[in-house]
Image (spheres, rainbow, N blue to C red):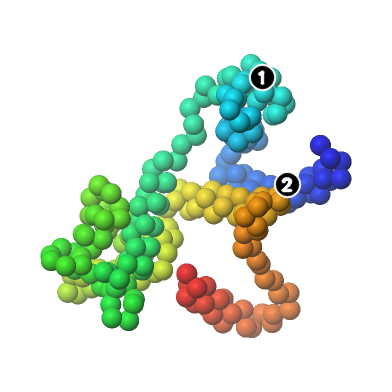
Amino acid sequence: MNEGILKPLSAAVLRLFRPLVRVLLRNGVSYRTFADFAKWVYVDVATKEFGIEGRKQSISRVSVITGLSRKEVKRVRELPRPDDSASVERYNRAARVIAAWRRESTFQDAEGNPAPLPLEGPGATFSELVKRFSGDVPVRAILDELIRVGAVERLEDGRVSLIVRAYIPETSEADKLHILGTDVGFLISTIDHNLQDDPIGPLFQRKVAYDNLPDEVLPEFRGLSAKRAQALL
């Protein structure tokens, strides 16, 4: 490795690990378990993303890339994939329904906002929305999930009204941890892309920080920030 890169990369990784390790320790995940996670990902990424075009990625090459022994690479490759499929499925389907509700004119009012939808019946209904954008999951299961996380409410006339702009689990720790994995993963993938000389150019990546806001304006600022951020979505 280029020695000029190793020092800043090491510093970046240590900063990245600190909040992650805090989450792991809070949830009782030992170092050994984390090391097993890391080993699995090393082998998986080396196998899928660092092969030679036109050639099958061999155990020996993965061993060279990762620094693991051939025996350990073989063992890790034979392990089942760490799985959070239930959270993934629930997140993806619920998120697709909300996104379509906000995007598709069929399910919007005259002003272009998500319209309150009858559960069943002719025309635009919640059942039709779910069937079109959530596959074969029962309508009631999606409705219950969206009610559970506070994304929709039932009106007095029985219609279903969307009250958020995105699927954000508020009660399930497993769902929140799933979002930790996907959102942080997307951000790091964006930064990784921007660190490379990619022909399609850099992806949008920005942040803003202030260090001199008076304490008394913070509640108002948080409310304004949340409102404007939701409007951007």
Disc 2 or 1, which lies upstream in sequence? 2
Q: Which residue is mark 2?
A: 13
> In this picture, is 147 found above or below 161?
above
Give the residue type that dot 1 points to: Ser
Q: Residue at x 41, y 61 (%)?
A: 167
Residue 222 drawn at (x, y percent):
56, 76
- Label 2 packing within 10 angstroms: few (<14), some (14-19), many (20+): few
Question: Which one is in front, 233 or 17?
Answer: 233
Q: Secondary structure at mark 1?
A: helix
- Label 1 packing within 10 angstroms: few (<14), some (14-19), many (20+): some
Foreground label between 2 and 1: 1
For residue 32, which quarter of the picture? top right
Question: Which one is in front, 200 or 2?
Answer: 200
> In this picture, is 144 found above or below 45?
below
Q: Secondary structure at mark 2?
A: helix
Looking at the image, residue 126 sits to the left or right of residue 223; the answer is: left
Looking at the image, residue 81 sits to the left or right of residue 9; the answer is: left
Q: Residue at x 54, y 54 (%)?
A: 183
The residue positioned farthest toward the left in the image shown:
121
Tag shown at residue 60: 1
Residue 48 drawn at (x, y percent):
57, 33
